[in-house]
Image: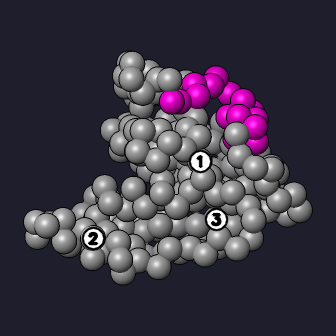
Amino acid sequence: MSSATERIAKAFENLRFREKTDGRPTIFVCGSWQPEKAIGICTESRKLGQLLAEAGFDLTIGPGTGVARFVIDGYRSVEKRGKIIFYLPKESEMERVGELMEEGADEVIKTELDYPLRNIVQVKESQAVVAIGGGAGTVTEVVTSALDYNKPTVILEGGEAYKAVSNLTELKKNINFVSSVEDAVRILEEKLSRPHKF
């Protein structure tokens, strides 16, 4: 193995992934972490969070900025809900790009990985992926989910990530394209075992 491959393998070995003992499927929601890019879909993002909580899903999401902020707010508005989990990259990586961790997590997992590897972990540790807005980073998460892990993958129409993914012919058959957050959650309920209702 190359030294880079060895370092990656070692990093994954040392991770202590979340114990899934509560019976609720975990949904990873991805989209832009930059507030100025997320503000245009704030209403849909809040609604998505609310509907995921009402359906009984746990939520994996970025550390509380941009799309994540609105999804978390919607999720936490539901009194009886599951958990919100953050998987953080290295602190130095977050500082480098200016991303901050905000409030809202029930559980925080510090991966000590860079962004690309952290993104793989978020996908791997979830049962399905929903993309709302986002750009190149969101595209990589969608591709990893749909092609590498064959997980239920839903992307809401509109935005850079949607345009990029919808033009990839070999990927389109593995992704559910929807026009509303209601349709996104309905597909997740159909494709996954029934989540725990509170």
Closest to the camera, between mark 3 and mark 1, is 1
Between 111 and 7, the residue placed more toward the observer is: 7
3 and 1 marks in contact (CB < 8 Å): no
Closest to the camera, between mark 2 and mark 1, is 2
Residue 40 in view here: no
Q: Is residue 69 left or right of residue 49?
A: left
Residue 188 lies in the magenta stretch: yes
- Which sits earlier in the primary sequence, circle 3 or circle 1? 3
In the rendered image, which quarter is residue 47 located in?
A: top right
Which x, y percent locates residue 53?
Answer: 76, 54
Which x, y percent locates residue 27?
Answer: 62, 52
What's the residue at 58%, 35% (across, down)?
A: 154
- The disc at residue 84 is 3
* Type of amino acid under label 3: Ile
Mark 2, other Cα within 10 Å: few <14 / some 14–19 / many ≥20: few
**118 is higher (above) or lower (below) than 168:** below
* Snapshot colouring: one colour
Q: Which residues are magenta?
A: 174-190
- The disc at residue 9 is 2
**86 is higher (above) or lower (below) than 11:** above
What separation in Å lies between label 3 and label 1 (alpha carbons)?
15 Å
Check disc 3 and report its element: helix, strand or loop. strand
Between 53 and 143, the residue placed more toward the observer is: 143
Residue 57 lies in the magenta stretch: no
Q: On the rendered image, what quadrant is the C terminus found in?
A: bottom right
Residue indicated by mark 1: 128
Q: On the rendered image, what quadrant is the N terminus found in?
A: bottom left
What separation in Å lies between label 3 and label 2 (alpha carbons)?
27 Å
Check disc 1 and report its element: helix, strand or loop. strand
What separation in Å lies between label 2 and label 1 (alpha carbons)?
24 Å
* Type of amino acid under label 2: Ala
